[in-house]
Image: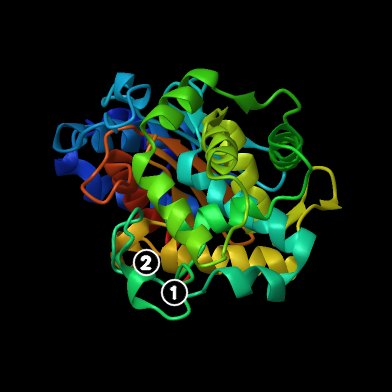
Amino acid sequence: MLMTYETADLKNIKCDSSNLHYISLILTAILNKGDGDMYKKEELICFVQEAKKYAHQGKVANYIPALGKANPNDLSIAVYMPDGQIIDAGDVTVKVTLQSISKIIALALVIMDHGEKAVFQKVGMEPTGDPFHSIAKLEEIQPAKPLNPMINAGALAVTHMISGRTVDERLQRLISFVRKLAGNPIISYSQEVAQSEFETAFLNRSLCYFLRQHHIIDEDVEDLMDLYTKQCAIEMTCIDLARIGLVFAMDGHDPLTDEQIIPLDIARICKTFMVTCGMYNASGEFAIKIGIPAKSGVSGGILASVPRRCGIGIFGPALDDKGNSLTGTKLLEFLSKTYSLSIF
């Protein structure tokens, strides 16, 4: 009987692929006890150890020199529950820069500022099978606006709409919003990573000039690049990521402060983009295999939101060929299958 299994049984078996089925049986039984007891630290440690075995198949984002310094074998996870309980594994004190994860946060902010209609006049809602930095679809579509806010062209259009008179004022407004979502008043950005990205962002500059030519943006390209690279360099721990994921999971409501930080309809829009576009041009496969609203970044971070259940933050800098954390994706696959977390 499944219900005869207990968490203690995990201590008596070796944590490797040959025992994953047995581990799954134990964890399924534990799941039946209810969400409050569903995650245990030793269980997450076991999954992290197994997912790490795939690290050699990926590589760090060395096209951004500062990110190229990461250790591809690093992997950590934090799960944030609505009651404030945090379960983690790996070194969750390591800070990860948001990179493309920041796109979903910036999108929520600008829709709150300008409204859904104004934002989606500048950027579309459709997924794309092209890489996140591709310029091809911009040339093919008339009028020439980015297909969605999760590709780089769309994210640049969104960042352009952050309210403020100066780059610093707009950046501080975004960081203040991030701090509120994460419940962490000292979150900032990595100057080293921002500078590294600013100096090597030649393709993003090309996208900006194309967008300016077609009147999607109208500000100085270097100012926008300054803001965008600092936005991507906002850094935090997996626990902060998981707390933000929890807010999205709870439809924009922070259960720990009882504040509706993001209006429900806007949180719904963001989670929809996380499903359809959040994992770059691997979003369809991710939806089928894992089925959790998520947003990745080339630093190796993943923010995931299991609706009404929990937020998840992951850092694993070994990337696959799509730019997603290879070990982080594998870790989420273990969790989703074990706990039936797919929304589909």
Instruction: Identify the element where label 1 is drawn.
Output: loop
Q: Residue at x 47, y 39 (%)?
A: 99
Label 1 and label 2: CA atoms lie apart by 8 Å
The picture places residue 171, in percent across and down from the top left corner, at 69, 36
Q: In this orientation, does residue 299 appear? A: yes
Disc 1 marks which amino acid? Phe
Residue at horizontal 72%, vertical 40%?
Answer: 170
Q: Nearer the viewer, residue 222 or 237?
A: 222
Check the picture and name the quadrant holding the C terminus: bottom left
Q: Position of residue 211 (x, y in %)?
A: 49, 60
> Which labelled disc corresponds to residue 128?
none
Q: Quadrant of residue 190?
A: top right
Q: To which residue does mark 1 refer?
A: 344
Q: Secondary structure at mark 2?
A: helix
Query: Residue 314 versus residue 191: which sits nearer the camera?
Result: 191
Write the residue at 79% across / 52% down: 261
Colouring chosen for the image of the structure: rainbow
Is 299 above or below relative to 164? Answer: above
Q: Are marks 1 and 2 in contact (CB under 8 Å)?
A: yes
1 or 2: tag closer to the N-terminus: 2
Residues packed near mark 1 inside 10 Å, few (<14), some (14 to 19) or many (20 plus)? few
Q: Residues within 10 Å of mark 2 (few under 14, many from 20)?
A: many
| Residue identifier under label 2 | 287
User: In this image, 13 relative to 236: left or right?
Assistant: left
Q: Is residue 287 above or below residue 294?
A: below
Q: Quadrant of residue 280?
A: bottom left
